[in-house]
Image (spheres, grey):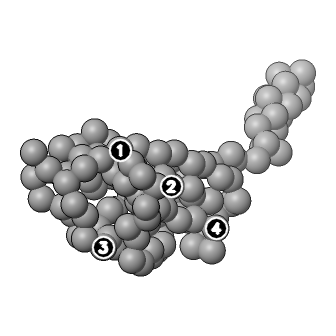
Amino acid sequence: MKILFALVLVSGVGAGTPAFAHAFLNHADPGAGAHLAKAPAAVRLDFSEALEPTFSGASVSNAGGHDFVSATKVSGRTITVTLGPLKPGSYKVRWHAVSVDTHRTQGAYSFTVGP
């Protein structure tokens, strides 16, 4: 009887604990530190969890802080940022993602266009 009680007690310990899922960046195209000969038409960010479109997004700016985003789409686990024309130089991608269970993550990375 004591063994059965112990098993019931141990099996119920994790049952009431909520799952803390966060949308982490799995893959980016172009990726962090990429050196591209040709400017990309878009940046695609793929996450580990489904995203809440209203509260997730990204931006792409040059060293002077000028934004080059012409459109942003959040669908499922992906943020796609359509870009305006990029000249040779360094660009910073900043993203923020809220998973459907309301946990927020954010980050940034850079890529370079040109020789």
Neighbours of disc 2 within 10 Å: few (<14), some (14-19), many (20+): some
Q: CA distance from mark 1 to mark 3?
A: 17 Å
Indicate left or right for 34 with 115 as reference.
right
Q: Give the number of callouts.
A: 4
Q: CA distance from mark 2 to mark 4?
A: 11 Å
Q: CA distance from mark 2 to mark 1?
A: 12 Å
Question: In percent of the image, x 76 and y 37: which residue is there?
Answer: 14
| Residue 95 badge | 2
Indicate the amino acid at tag 4: Phe
Closer mark to the observer between disc 3 and disc 4: 3
Neighbours of disc 1 within 10 Å: few (<14), some (14-19), many (20+): some
Q: Give residue 47's position: percent from left, percent from top.
A: 45, 55
* Residue 34 vertical placement versus 86 (above, below): above
Closer mark to the observer between disc 3 and disc 2: 3
| Residue 45 badge | none
Q: Which residue is mark 3?
A: 84
Closer mark to the observer between disc 1 and disc 4: 1
Indicate the amino acid at tag 2: Trp
* Residue 59 vertical placement versus 85 (above, below): above
Q: Secondary structure at mark 3?
A: loop
Indicate the amino acid at tag 1: Ser
Question: In percent of the image, x 51 and y 45: which residue is there?
Answer: 107
Closer mark to the observer between disc 2 and disc 1: 1
Q: Which residue is mark 4?
A: 55
Question: In percent of the image, x 38 and y 67: which residue is there?
Answer: 68
Q: Give residue 45's position: percent from left, percent from top.
A: 38, 58
Q: Does the image show residue 104?
A: yes
Q: Give the mark, 1 or 3, whose residue is nearer the N terminus.
A: 3
Pick the front one: 17 or 6: 17
Pick the front one: 78 or 12: 78
Q: Secondary structure at mark 2?
A: strand
Q: Which residue is mark 1?
A: 110
